[in-house]
Image (spheres, rainbow, N blue to C red):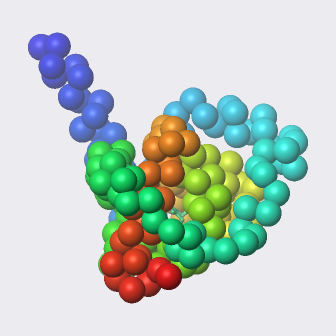
Amino acid sequence: MRRAWVLAPLALWTAMSVAGCGGGGNAAPSGGSSGDASSASGSAAGVLPAGLDQGPRAGASAIDASQIEPGEHLFQTKGCSACHGFGKRVSCPDLLGVTKRRTAQWMENQILHPEIMTKHDPISHQLFAQYSLQMPNQGLTPEQAHQVIEFLKHKDHEAGEGH
Ligand code: HEC
């Protein structure tokens, strides 16, 4: 009985994530963060650090090998893999080569505050327009975001994309 209560919302959430990816509909779980995002839009300049996309791409920096495994684990367990693939064109951005396209700081903000990025960052906004889907905030800590980014750098390095 109790167990059914726990599992039902989880199953629903999973179904929504997957459907959201394929359908391109308006299925983004907004949660409680929409209030934050709209109140933040009044002071857009202070919402995101300046120059997120400036400087060397993430893949140009050395990989912290100790973070790859925890990063991969988070990628699988925090829902990322339901939407994103590597070298596969699904209906969310292909993450192969992403560390060649973006800076670490930009990706960190996309992972930690996707709902703010699509509103206030020009690149993220463009992706949002292209995929017609809001990436949900998966509740990672800054340290976890860093671990995932090291995993992404590793994937690109393996594929000869980074460097
Ligand atoms: C419901 C599907 C979904 C989930 C879950 C999701 N994303 Fe995304 N992600 C997107 C979409 C869609 C975009 C494009 C921006 C937008 O529209 O919000 C995106 C953009 C990105 C980008 C930038 C891609 C590029 O080409 O620059 C990165 C990096 C990223 N996501 C990483 C992650 C990570 C890491 C996780 C897990 C913590 C995650 N995403 C979870 C859908 C998702």
- Describe residue 40's horizontal placement relative to residue 146 as left or right: right
Q: Residue furthest left?
A: 1
Which residue lies at the image location 56% right of the left edge and 70% below the top edge? 61
Vertical comparison of 5 with 87: above or below? above
Quarter of the picture holding the N terminus: top left
* Front-lying residue, 19 or 42: 42
From the top left corner, tell me how far across and down residue 81 is, in percent. 32, 58
User: Height in image: 98 above or below 50?
Assistant: below
Q: Residue at x 79, y 45 (%)?
A: 47
Picture coordinates of residue 153, whole percent (x, y) = 45, 69
Q: Is residue 28 visible?
A: no
Report the side of 29 relative to 10 (left or right). right
Number of marks present in the image shown: 0
Kindly tell me whether residue 145 is visible in this rendering. Answer: yes
Quadrant in the rendering for residue 125: bottom right
Tell which of 154 and 106 is nearer to you: 154
Report the residue at 30% width, 45% height from top: 77
> Which of the pair 115/129 is nearer the observer?
115
At 54% from the left edge and 64% from the top edge, which residue is drawn?
A: 132
77 relative position to 58: left or right? left
